[in-house]
Image (spheres, grey):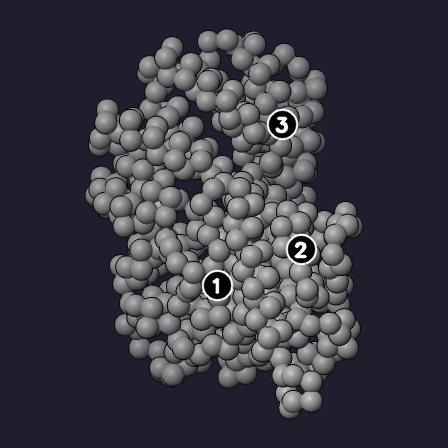
């Protein structure tokens, strides 16, 4: 019996049956609860449709309007509709500060920063008892939208009156971290942890800021205490004892499983051989897109599709792949296994892509966006790291090189509207990460936003330039152009919310790189 799909399918059918029953005799409480269940239970479109149907039936019912606004802002990224719904509630209930705060947040996310800020100021002025809650909610929105300076200014003002509030203290730390001031953030998180030692959100934020400041020993220890991101498939792995640094594993069966994104698995899988050196029998459970690549790169490990396990299998220990640095005692940059390149392409695949590529060199691969996401929180996070081909290509071209798209997923549609220098797209021939690696092996440089392709190129030792997000991910630290994780990586860090000035610097660097690449070619008649 497979450990996946059948329970999920049964749950979907149950939710749809509940929807039909609720529609026969709806109440705001039953509709609200079911909408949330559907949105968190693999039926977000049906959850949204249910919420909007109740608004259609009851256009002046503030409770149904609020349910729909909540669903649209928390489970799908449709703040444009949410703004209209929240405005109507404010019209129906003009003295409701909670709804006004939601509207201020929605306006900011929807791009109307002046209107959202003005409404926030009105709330603070007329509803002093709502100052703390409104300040927390608005600054959370500012941080998610990349306005860390604005968030910090509000927080430092409010914290003077609420000096013992752990949420406020941790948010000051978060804002400082987003401004790439990790060392300054640590004392704020430390005090927040002292006041709320059981708060999981504060614990995770504190661990990541420690890692960003390269305090690895304490950072990895706290990071390992996070609530793991388990899916309907991987939650089965939680039954096994979680591996700890001092566990004796010689002769033991250890299951490593993908817990976060593809990039995290690619970054940390290099630590897996350390467990094997300690005598463990290691099985790696990852997304199907990674199976062939990791199987070729680590033939000594058993690499399997995460969905292919059966309920009867037994393991002595299990561990999320991102916790490998903790159990292998990484305490400094020197503790990163110096094995780059540690991924391997199939030579036959490399030759297959070589035959498909244009002959002109140098060849430069481009990735302008992460994969499209669906939850509101994930969409906001992706907006800070992703751009478009029009923006990236418009800034970097024309360039005396052959451009190759490495873009995956829905953002590939940008190619259809692109009218600049040709960008060759072979991604229809790419079926998994092993294919992507084989394509990258034929390139001379990769330019990417902070996504999994960057990790592939770095793990291959291929020259790779990253267009970082302004609030750089913890793994890249606060500053600098290089990274101990990938020696071939060059980081371009924005100082503004816009990528445009950074892309201009990248354009100048790219022109110089191409000139140097051509200058290094042997003269005609000289041996290559």
Q: Residue at x 70, y 66 (%)?
A: 402
**Foreground of the two, 511 or 184:** 511
Q: Quadrant of residue 225?
A: bottom left
Q: Residues within 10 Å of mark 3 (few under 14, many from 20)?
A: some
- Mark 3 or mark 1: which comes first in sequence? 3
Q: Secondary structure at mark 1?
A: strand
Residues tagged 3 and 1 counted as in contact (Cβ below 8 A) = no
> Which quadrant would the N terminus be assigned to in this image?
bottom right
Between the residue at mark 3 and the residue at mark 1, the CA separation in whole angstroms equals 37 Å
- Mark 2 or mark 3: which comes first in sequence? 3
| Eye-nearest disc, 2 or 3 | 2
Which residue does the numbered mark 2 point to in the structure image? Answer: 397
Q: Position of residue 5 (x, y in %)?
A: 64, 56
Between the residue at mark 2 and the residue at mark 1, the CA separation in whole angstroms equals 19 Å
The answer to whether 436 appears left or right of 201 in the picture is right
Q: Position of residue 427 (x, y in %)?
A: 72, 63
Q: Position of residue 210 (x, y in %)?
A: 30, 54
Residues tagged 2 and 1 counted as in contact (Cβ below 8 A) = no
Q: Secondary structure at mark 3?
A: helix
Q: Quadrant of residue 79?
A: top right
- The numbered disc on residue 490 is 1
Which residue does the numbered mark 3 point to in the structure image? Answer: 80
Q: Position of residue 64 (x, y in %)?
A: 60, 20
187 is higher (above) or lower (below) than 99: below
| Eye-nearest disc, 3 or 1 | 1
């Amino acid at each position: 019996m497979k450990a996946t799909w059948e329970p999920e399918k049964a749950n979907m059918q149950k939710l749809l049956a509940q929807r039909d029953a609720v529609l026969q005799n709806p109440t705001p409480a039953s509709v609200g609860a079911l909408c949330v269940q559907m949105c968190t239970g693999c039926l977000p479109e049906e959850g949204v449709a249910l919420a909007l149907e109740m608004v259609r039936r009851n256009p002046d019912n503030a409770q149904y309007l609020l349910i729909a606004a909540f669903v649209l802002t928390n489970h799908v990224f449709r703040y444009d509709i949410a703004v209209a719904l929240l405005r109507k509630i404010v019209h129906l209930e003009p003295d409701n500060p909670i709804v006004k705060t939601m509207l201020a947040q929605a306006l900011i996310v929807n791009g109307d920063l002046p209107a959202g800020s003005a409404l926030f100021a009105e709330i603070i002025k007329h509803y002093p008892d709502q100052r703390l809650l409104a300040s927390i909610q608005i600054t959370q929105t500012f941080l998610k939208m990349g306005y860390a300076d604005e968030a910090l200014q509000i927080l430092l003002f409010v914290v003077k009156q609420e000096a013992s509030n752990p949420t406020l203290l941790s948010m000051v730390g978060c804002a400082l971290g987003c401004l790439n001031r990790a060392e300054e953030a640590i004392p704020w998180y430390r005090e927040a942890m002292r006041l709320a030692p059981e708060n999981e959100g504060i614990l995770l934020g504190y661990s990541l800021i420690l890692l960003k400041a390269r305090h690895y020993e304490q950072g990895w220890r706290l990071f390992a205490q996070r609530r793991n991101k388990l899916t309907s498939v991987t939650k089965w792995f939680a039954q096994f004892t979680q591996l700890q640094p001092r566990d004796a594993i010689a002769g033991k069966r250890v299951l490593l499983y993908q817990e976060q994104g593809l990039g995290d698995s690619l970054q940390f899988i290099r630590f897996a051989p350390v467990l094997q050196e300690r005598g463990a029998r290691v099985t790696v459970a990852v997304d199907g897109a990674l199976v062939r690549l990791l199987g070729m790169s680590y033939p000594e490990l058993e690499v399997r599709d995460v969905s292919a396990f059966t309920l009867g299998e037994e393991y002595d220990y299990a561990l999320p792949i991102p916790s490998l640095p903790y159990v292998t005692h990484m305490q400094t940059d020197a503790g990163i296994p110096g094995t780059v390149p540690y991924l391997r392409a199939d030579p036959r695949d490399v030759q297959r892509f070589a035959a498909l590529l244009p002959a002109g060199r140098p060849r430069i691969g481009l990735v302008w966006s992460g994969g499209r996401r669906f939850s509101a929180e994930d969409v906001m996070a992706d907006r800070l790291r992703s751009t478009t081909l029009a923006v990236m290509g418009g800034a970097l071209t024309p360039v005396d090189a052959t451009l190759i798209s490495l873009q995956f997923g829905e953002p590939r549609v940008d190619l259809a509207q692109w009218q600049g220098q040709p960008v060759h797209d072979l991604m229809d021939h790419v079926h998994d990460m092993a294919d992507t690696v084989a394509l990258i092996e034929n390139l001379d440089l990769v330019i990417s936003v902070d996504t999994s392709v960057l990790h592939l190129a770095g793990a291959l030792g291929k020259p790779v330039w990253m267009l970082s997000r302004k609030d750089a991910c913890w793994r890249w630290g606060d500053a600098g152009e290089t990274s101990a994780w990938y020696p071939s990586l060059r980081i371009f860090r924005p100082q503004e919310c816009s990528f445009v000035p950074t892309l201009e610097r990248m354009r100048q660097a790219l022109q110089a790189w191409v000139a140097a690449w051509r200058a290094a070619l042997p003269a005609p008649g000289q041996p290559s």
